[in-house]
Image (tube, rainbow, N blue to C red):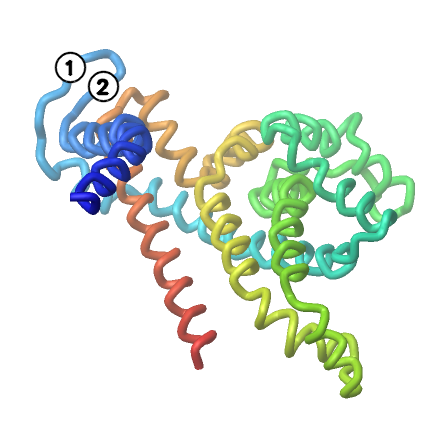
């Protein structure tokens, strides 16, 4: 009797969370799945077409080109964010006043909106009044100002620089938490045994902080696969759509070409790809950790 009442009390406390998930996760997801099987438009209407949108997606060169560009962008920026974030975490782990201030300064850009930071960096990379071109010309690195967004590789590099400045502090904080959770006795024992600083990092800090590093890597990779704001503001897809990310292409189809049903199908395909990639990364990391 007491066990049953306790179970009902537990369910009662879970009800708000379950309602939240049902209203804001399950219902929108179900509606998205249904919409992806229609030819719905922002202008209204929409008949059921089954899997026609998914068949169309597999022959959509624009989508696969944008997906490849998104994957390449993710492969470039994720190691940069993780490497710099880990180095920053190593430098600021101790809770001295100077390192706390440094940690706060590195984390500060994270609280700035992504659209705001993209506009700031768009101005910094401007051909005529941008600070970057001015410095490159003044130091003799360039003979004349560079048009950063005329070529896809330069535009991608500019976006990577801007996103690194904004996001690296987030990964740093996660890794600092993981490093600070390591017992001081382990570090002190390694120092007594004569382990150098980098030996301690490689054999103690990296293995024991692996979960925090994995979490930071997953968040970074998923965020990069969902990149939109920075490319929409800084490159606008130029030149000739070569800097369209997957989400940008979905936006174009859904809200510019008014193909809401087709855009929903592309969204679900991208969701499955991201989930599969995250599952593979978790599986490989877990296997490596258990070996």
Labels 2 & 1 near each other (Cβ < 8 A):
yes
- Kindly identify the residue that appears in the image at 44 percent across and 40 percent down: 226
- The front one of 185 and 121 is 185
Percent from the top left, x then y, of residue 165? 69, 42
- Kindly identify the residue that appears in the image at 65 percent across and 41 percent down: 158
Q: Residue furthest bottom?
A: 193
Residue 43 placement: quadrant:
top left
Can see residue 154? no
Q: Is residue 104 left or right of residue 158?
A: right
Is 88 drawn above or below residue 58 in the view shown? below
* CA separation in Å, label 2 and label 1: 6 Å
Percent from the top left, x then y, of residue 27? 22, 28
Secondary element type, mark 1: loop
Percent from the top left, x then y, of residue 237? 50, 33
Task: Give the quarter of the figure containing the N terminus.
Answer: top left
Q: Which mark is residue 45?
A: 1
Q: Which residue is mark 2?
A: 41
Percent from the top left, x then y, of residue 214? 51, 60
Residue 198 placement: quadrant:
bottom right
Q: Is residue 119 left or right of residue 132?
A: left
- Kindly identify the residue that appears in the image at 58 percent across and 44 percent down: 156
- Kindly identify the residue that appears in the image at 81 percent across and 33 percent down: 131
Q: Is residue 157 left or right of residue 269?
A: right
- The front one of 162 and 223 is 223
Residue 22 placement: quadrant:
top left
Q: Residues within 10 Å of mark 2 (few under 14, many from 20)?
A: many
Q: Residue furthest front?
A: 1
Secondary element type, mark 2: loop
Q: Residues within 10 Å of mark 1 (few under 14, many from 20)?
A: few
- The front one of 265 and 4 is 4
């Amino acid at each position: 009797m007491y066990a049953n009442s306790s179970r009902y009390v537990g369910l009662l406390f879970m009800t708000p969370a379950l309602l939240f998930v049902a209203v804001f996760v399950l219902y929108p997801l179900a509606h998205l799945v249904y919409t992806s099987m229609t030819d719905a438009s922002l202008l209204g209407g929409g008949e059921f077409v089954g899997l026609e949108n998914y068949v169309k997606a597999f022959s959509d060169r624009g989508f696969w080109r944008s997906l490849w560009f998104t994957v390449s962008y993710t492969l470039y920026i994720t190691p940069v964010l993780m490497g710099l974030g880990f180095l920053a975490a190593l430098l600021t782990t101790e809770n001295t006043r100077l390192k706390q201030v440094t940690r706060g300064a590195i984390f500060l850009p994270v609280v700035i909106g992504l659209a705001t930071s993209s506009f700031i960096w768009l101005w910094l990379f401007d051909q005529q009044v941008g600070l970057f071109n001015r410095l490159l010309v003044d130091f003799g690195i360039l003979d004349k100002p560079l048009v950063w967004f005329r070529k896809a590789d330069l535009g991608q590099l500019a976006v990577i620089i801007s996103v690194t400045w904004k996001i690296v502090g987030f990964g740093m904080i996660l890794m600092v938490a993981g490093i600070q959770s390591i017992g001081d006795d382990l570090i002190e024992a390694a120092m007594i045994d004569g382990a150098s600083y980098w030996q301690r990092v490689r054999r103690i800090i990296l293995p024991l902080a692996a979960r925090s590093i994995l979490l930071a890597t997953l968040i970074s990779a998923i965020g990069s696969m969902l990149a939109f704001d920075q490319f929409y503001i800084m490159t606008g897809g130029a030149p000739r759509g070569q800097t369209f990310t997957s989400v940008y292409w979905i936006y174009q189809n859904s809200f510019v070409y008014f193909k809401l049903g087709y855009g929903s199908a592309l969204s679900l395909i991208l969701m499955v790809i991201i989930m599969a990639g995250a599952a593979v990364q978790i599986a490989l990391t877990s296997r490596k950790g258990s070996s």
